[in-house]
Amino acid sequence: MKKYIISSFLAIIFILSGCYDLDRAPFDKPSSSTFWKTEAQCKQGIMGVYASLKNNDLYGKMFLIDINSDVAVGYDEYEPLMIGTCTPRTGFLNGKWKNGYDAIQKANTALRNLGVADIPDNVKQTMIAEAKFLRALVYFHLLDYFGGLPLYDETTNLELEFNQLLKPRSTIEETRAFILKDLTDVINSSLPISWPASDYGRVTKGAVYALRGKVNLYNKSYAEAIKDFEEVIDPKYNYALYPKYEELFKPFEGHVSSEMIFSIVNVGGISTPYGMPFCFYAGSRATFNSWNNSVPSSGLVEMYEYKDGRPFNWEEIFPGYTNVDNAVKEKVYRVTIDLKTLKRIPVPEEAAAEKKLLDMYAQRDPRLNATVILPFTQHLGWVSNAEKMMTFYFGKDETGKLVVLNEKDGYFRNNKGWDSYYWRKYIPEGNWKGLITDRAHTPVNFSIIRLADVYLMLAEAYNEVGRSSEAVTYINKIRSRAGIALLNSGPDYLKAMSKEEVFERIVKERAYELAGEGIRDSDLRRWRRSHLILNHKEFSILGKQMTTRKFNENRDYLWPIPAGEIEYNPELKQNPSW
């Protein structure tokens, strides 16, 4: 496949999404009497629905929601969620609700007008199926966070009823049934199994089965989920794990590979900035002068096993490392810097600690290094509009005084002042050969569902119905791609026989595989684990407190309905304890 696809599909998205005013057509100003008349106009309208997924508080900043889990820590916009200070007036809540319903109404507008459009019926029915899938996807996304929702379908005419959208919330069960009906309608349609390269990114039948399987899994409808996921892995769909995990999150072959079942298409380059802000909010000062609103947690780094499957333990490498006084951590990570040259001064004890760390990293699950930038490792940055190789050190001078290192000198620096890890996943290397020119538009497709996720969801469903050995088979497919020891292949630390043992493996494997992709928060909430593991202090690499997490068991499993929405529509009832 070509390294980067610039297709008619993307060209239409460019037209629709240069700015909000352009993106309004054909949804606001033009009425159905002036648009939706030709096949080209109808396709343009459908592309506008796809484009709406990229809105910041819908999927645009989805990766940041990992901070409300055990794999990431963050600050600013989503911080209230993490530290328990969120209220019904917190800004991103309104953004999620508004962006979601904007996308739903665009899908409804498309459905209503496609129904009467004078275009070939096969084209019409395919576009109707696409709009229904996108509507179902967004309703499911909102259901996950808010619970039962006001349900609007294509019978609602936004042009005529803008001030009359005052329905009460449907129940969770009614909302889910609406979503499942849409997805079943699409499955029974003529939606293709694949598209030509010129239409890359449009929904396929395999994506519909995958999403319906996920909806069923979240509802604990395991038998139905298994049927859907088994359909997805049927050879006729031609999905396959991409052999190089780290390449899935770079703008080359991996992110358009056969592992990707449904993704948001992102592009970049001069005059075509149309990506998502991974670099901007999950990078560092060393990458386009970006921020680090999300960083990997110390707990995530400690989760990854050795390649042979052994659990990781700091005490085996550096005795006393886990002591609360942090003295050992300082000795492990601090290096001496010459203040005149800002270069590292060789110190034997520091070099020995570095070697131990690098040797340890090399023995760990390779997904760790593909996901996280680790101390004493390097990453190709972009500083002062040029490539610069960056090294991750914590510095001190010859007297022991701490030194703040700077990206201009080839070092990493955290905006918040935290001694944190950094994300490598989705973060540019240099400027990716000119593909990224704007930190707010990272040109990597963002996966909504990929095959590895499906394998792990299928394993979970199998395990829940007593088919644990089959579950292990699919977990092992993921581990095999990663290059680590397979479960039940020898020592006791690889044992996974009982339902409970297999489930714990799935919990860990989903962290290793999907960290930084915005899924972990949903996983922990649906497993009802958030309140058990998200009430603690978060510490940095050097053992300094970064923040304190709070998760209220009686409140936080659902987000509050935005206060402004309830004021506008008193028929909406607030979620419990908010």
Image: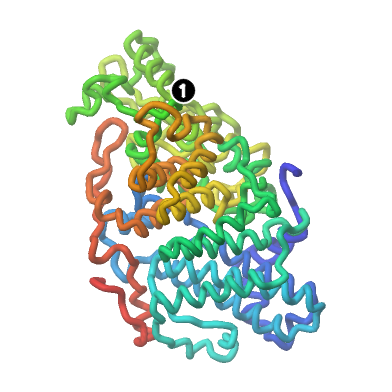
Q: What residue would you read off at disc 1?
A: 362
Residue 80 visible to the viewer = yes
Q: Is residue 383 visible?
A: no
x, y percent for residue 482 = 52, 34
Is 507 drawn above or below residue 246 in the view shown? below
In the image, what residue occupies the spot 30% across and 54% down?
Answer: 530
Q: Residue at x 39, y 44 (%)?
A: 502
State the image coordinates of residue 360 (x, y, percent, origin top left).
40, 22
Is 260 situated left or right of 67 in this image?
A: right
Q: For the residue labelled by badge 1, is the local secondary structure a helix, a strand or a loop?
A: helix
> For the N terminus, which image quadrant?
top right
Q: Judge by depth and name the residue closer to the eye, 524 or 506.
A: 506
Q: Position of residue 531 (x, y in %)?
A: 25, 55
- Quadrant assignment, res 252: top right
Say what amino acid the circle numbered 1 marks: Ala
Q: How is the image coloured?
A: rainbow
Q: Badge 1: how crowded within 10 Å, few (<14), some, or many (20+)?
A: few
Residue in view at x 58 percent, y 35 percent: 429
Residue at the spot x=22%, y=47% of the render? 536
